[in-house]
Image (spheres, coloured by chain):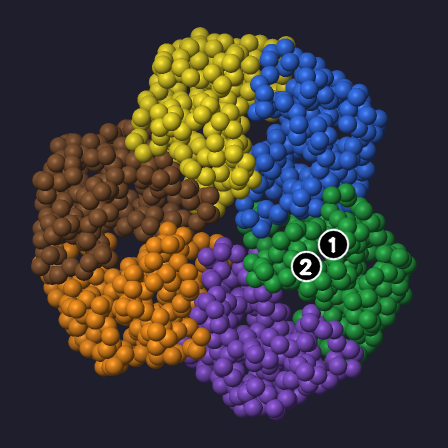
Chain colours: A brown, B yellow, C blue, D orange, E green, F purple
């Protein structure tokens, strides 16, 4: 039995509030257990220099933690004049994960800015960010779609993420902070709705892992993502209608 | 009649959720109309260099806006490597306002960090921040007080803030964004529970104001703060019990 | 009697040297008692991005203190890689104050940069900066006007600023550093030549102030600004000829 | 056949020059095909604040690219005043990989700084950095060991890294730049000398990958690392004598 | 005949106002022709880390230009978040020049901060800074000396600086901006009161110079410095009494 | 006899490896004794703003030291968010030195970026950088020339640099670190192939130098540069064919 009474391979309760704020085209509060992240998707009608004139769009992500989101207050990046290294690593992961399901040509020369701001961190903030950002992205793209801005609908699939780890020789799904900080192995599994892998990041800083353990971790991560995607399908319903049509 | 159907001198509905997040000793979501700010009060058991060894504590504030909180996405300060000038001005105002009701000797050599992060900006964010931060401060100080950390209770009063302005020759209370951005005169009035002024910041960049107009603005601001303080008294109830005892 | 033998509501001697340096279109050394500030107004034939193509100009201010200007040497902003928070607050105040008397359409698509650099700080540097910058602005605008760059003369009035405060229960005008640092209440009053208020910034961090005290402070501030404006009229003489004509 | 005439699962030639420079305790030039990285390990007799007094040491890594190391000149980080996001991600990976084989208690309160500076980038710089940094680390630790600075020898194993990818439906080992930039899937596999995984970073930004593909990628990566470790054993010979004794 | 009617080897008029501001121990306004620099010498009772516990003091210099000091407004360093490269080069020159005449052991563990802020730049600002800073340094050291802070008087000589150049095949002394910007060769000569060289910085970016030309340049620079030192001796009179006694 | 057994006026062995890396048009590893610097010359087909539309090109230099290049590890500039002052001074020197032999009109509107990165510092890094950068520049310009990008060949001469100093009353040529750090006088002499001076930087921070000593220093520096240029002529052979033709 786990710290919070879950079975080893049980997801934490996930709650997603859409239209959480009113200005960004997509705005989501995602709560995964005690972890809470605000994910917004804002549209800017221009692209970074390297895409100017290419006809292609871009999806980029920024990740931050509010000072009060952690056990001891976290100083703001601007107070240190440098982006936290961990945030930098995470926001690159989020950006790549979301781009994997976007047809950038179909998006057209615009940028979708994904902002993931953690307001309470209890483990798994990067995975919650990816899942929440996917919902915000759907809402933003559908808003543009209703304005008939796309010839081809740009979303080609769903994406979600979950953490898995090994703690006291047990494979755990969706670790909370207390589990995460005492786990030997920690892995983030990002998958799409075809059961394929988008990103895998596994760290054995505390203890390396064997190929066999990896197999178990991936199986649990896959099951976890399957569960999350089911929830998302239920939540999004008709809003997923056009997703994937570009690949058909 | 105003944009949102209010009377000229009517406050917007205010909703305060305490214990909004779980790590900071005080954590408040304040909603004033459509403006939403997360205010946390975190305690650090040390003081800035200029107070080391003085026996006195410190209260300092930081203010930020999430990128998705405004009409068009606001770049993060860290992306520009500089603290927004407006944020700098506002966080100094919040810090001074809260320090005005704190007995820093009684607080002891510790710092209370106030963080005000705007998640949706619809006018009056600096005033909402001050009011919300006051509640977070009460909660944080009471948490320390329950741990018997104070010989003398350090809060000496209540503080709240509201904006007033002149628009189309009418004095308006508690302006929303649309009103604020078209007002001729804009003033922020910070007051305590004795009806005294803590901070006054009036700007006639668009049109100067006369002494007579100032008198009207202040009267409306005073009434507004009286109304807010009444709400706070109801909200905080017994938690205000020890406030002000240090001055008696 | 005050530290420097003045009456409570007596201004410090003010001395303004115009054409203090030769490159900026307006260049003023303003001395208010022992406070000395160099104020220059430089013209740049372009505007910030948000005004491009609008036909409107801009007036912006920067404020700094030389390292040797204060009791203990002040580190340069660049040594800390961040603009001092207090400087940030002050330069926004100066910018708004000067823009209040400028017809930005009449100015045309150009920027006037106001630079206020304190070489000796003995209280009231932000007020001295505003008053000095106004003179530099007049000189710069008149220089452009002599080159027939304006269809409509862009200055619509005069502006000046003075500090008032309460110390030992006496309302004092134009506080020097020693008074300022021991005052209970401190207020900066920016006014125009019609006796209207442009900016009011009052701080009761040490002790709040009542409505009645505010009335006294404003009356003294108004009288102080009246005195300063009289001095400016004498100093500027014919150079004020066209000021205000745009409003007639 | 590949761009450079290799078999799909053939490593590029690897050349390691030890004692490449003379000041750092460990200094290595690693050449993997056309990729060239200088890896140094410098010892500092203090630890970061979070470890002060803990008796434990630290291993941290920094990664950079010389401006001339890439096809088009890369601006220096200092010219942009921010650490490149990719560099940030990579140096965290290198640090975690090396710490996985270090007994930080045995290291004692000192920091080993790993610096990986790419002088020519032709794909796989992060993997070459890890492998090269391991050799530099061995040399630095052995230098300290010869000075009898350790009660327990702090290195507990070997570590190496190699990239694998899928390009035109073929699994490739150790991709050069041209292959890497046109690969669909890209994975970095960090392993120890027991055949266990230390870090796995797989990216399917261009195309997701299936569980089956993952299995192939990992098998190829494992074989690649086995080959590299064999080379390292030959290169290091007796210098590996004490490695791993702490775990026995 | 030169632009300003001087003979080729004639110095510009130099005017030095001591005690120009009141807080720094030494404060000088130096005017060399139309070039005007404020030089202050401030004392801090601590030394940089590399000298802690050494018993030795330090002299360091910072150099800046006010935005309005040049023909077109110069942006502040803080606006670009980086110290101007030229300023960096100049302040290192000033620091080395002044340290050359200071007995750092005799100074004791304190730092003298030299700040040179150009308020009007008309050529030769770095040389004017060195000469002006020397006077400020004398005043600061003598102020400390009157407080009997030194066992051994720390100033061991005088220092001054002047520019020389070649323009239209004529060697010119003490170039103004218009000459400087059109000169082929430009050299700054820093000397002490024994006629020895402290620093030489000659630049033939526009046109290289021969050994013979160098001889002429140095002769003219030497004569120029002799003239300046004579002026300084007259200006400083008795205040130079103890200078040099440490070397006797 | 010197530390490394050389005669006082003997150069250290110099070794230059051309085409050291493959992307930059010019890429050189220069070794002067134990000092090793990578110098690359990269071509960018645009110019800085101040030259846009002028038809002229630009040559600019950046200088850095790898963290492991010095006795004790040198922190990266980006870790301190500021360019090292010494680096700033040096890169300006390198830039001016190289521009002295370039016909910027003939270069056309392109920038040549010179990057000098020290991988091992044993004295004289700035001089080695200039000499190495000259070779890289020749290679880059010749590469462009082979592509027939120039109407007029833009290199007008050769440039080299060497340090001279006085230590224990002996004039030394080409000082290594141990000599440099204990020298009384230190001078860098940059010359062209006509025996003319390009830059002279002499520092008597430890002890001033007389006119007579200067004469000796310059003579030794001149001889040293003559020796280096001979080596360069041998090394470059036919690649120097077109150098200087523009001046004929």
Task: Left or right? Give the position of A97 relative to B164.
Answer: left
Quarter of the rendering containing residue A161? top left
Cβ atoms at labels 1 and 2 below 8 Å apart: yes
Q: Residues within 10 Å of mark 1 (few under 14, many from 20)?
A: some
| Residue C9 appearing in the image | yes
Chain assignment, label 2: E
Q: Which mark is residue E108?
A: 2
Viewer-side residue, E144 vs B162 = E144
Task: Left or right? Give the position of B32 relative to C25.
Answer: left
Quadrant placement of the N terminus of chain F: bottom right
Q: Position of residue A80 (x, y in %)?
A: 46, 47
* Distance between mark 1 and mark 2 Cα atoms: 9 Å
From the viewer's perspective, is residue B112 above or below residue D179? above
Q: Position of residue B171 (x, y in %)?
A: 53, 11
| Residue E8 appearing in the image | no
In percent of the image, x 46 and y 39: which residue is there? B46
In percent of the image, x 40 and y 48: which residue is there? A83
Task: Left or right? Give the position of B11 relative to A239.
Answer: right
Q: Which residue is mark 1?
A: E149
SS at badge 1: loop
Quarter of the rendering containing residue F200? bottom right
Whichever of callouts 1 and 2 sits on the residue coming sooner in the sequence is: 2
Q: How many marks?
A: 2
In percent of the image, x 55 and y 75: which residue is there? F125
SS at badge 2: loop
Quadrant placement of the C terminus of chain F: bottom right
In percent of the image, x 82 and y 63: which residue is there? E243
């Amino acid at each position: 039995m786990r710290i919070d009474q879950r079975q080893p391979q049980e997801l934490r309760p996930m709650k997603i509030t859409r239209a959480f704020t009113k200005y960004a085209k997509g705005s989501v509060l995602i709560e995964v257990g005690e972890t809470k992240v605000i994910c917004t998707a804002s549209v800017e009608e221009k692209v970074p220099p390297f895409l100017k004139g290419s006809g292609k769009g871009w999806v980029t992500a920024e990740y931050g933690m509010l000072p009060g989101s952690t056990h001891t207050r976290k100083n703001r990046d601007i107070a240190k004049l440098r982006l936290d290294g961990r945030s930098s690593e995470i926001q690159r992961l989020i950006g790549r994960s979301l781009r994997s399901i976007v047809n950038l040509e179909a998006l057209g020369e615009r940028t979708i800015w994904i902002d993931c701001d953690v307001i309470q961190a209890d483990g798994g903030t990067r995975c919650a960010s990816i899942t929440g950002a996917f919902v915000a992205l759907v809402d933003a793209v559908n808003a543009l779609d209703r304005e008939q801005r796309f010839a081809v609908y740009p979303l080609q699939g769903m994406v979600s993420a979950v953490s898995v780890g090994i703690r006291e020789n047990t494979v755990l799904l969706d670790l909370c902070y207390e589990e995460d900080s005492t786990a030997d192995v920690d892995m983030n599994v990002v998958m799409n709705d075809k059961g394929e892998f988008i990103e895998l990041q596994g760290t054995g800083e505390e203890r390396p892992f064997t190929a066999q353990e990896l197999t178990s971790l991936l199986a649990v991560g896959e099951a976890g993502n399957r569960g999350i995607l089911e929830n998302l399908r239920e939540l999004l319903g008709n809003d997923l209608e056009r997703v994937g049509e570009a690949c058909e």
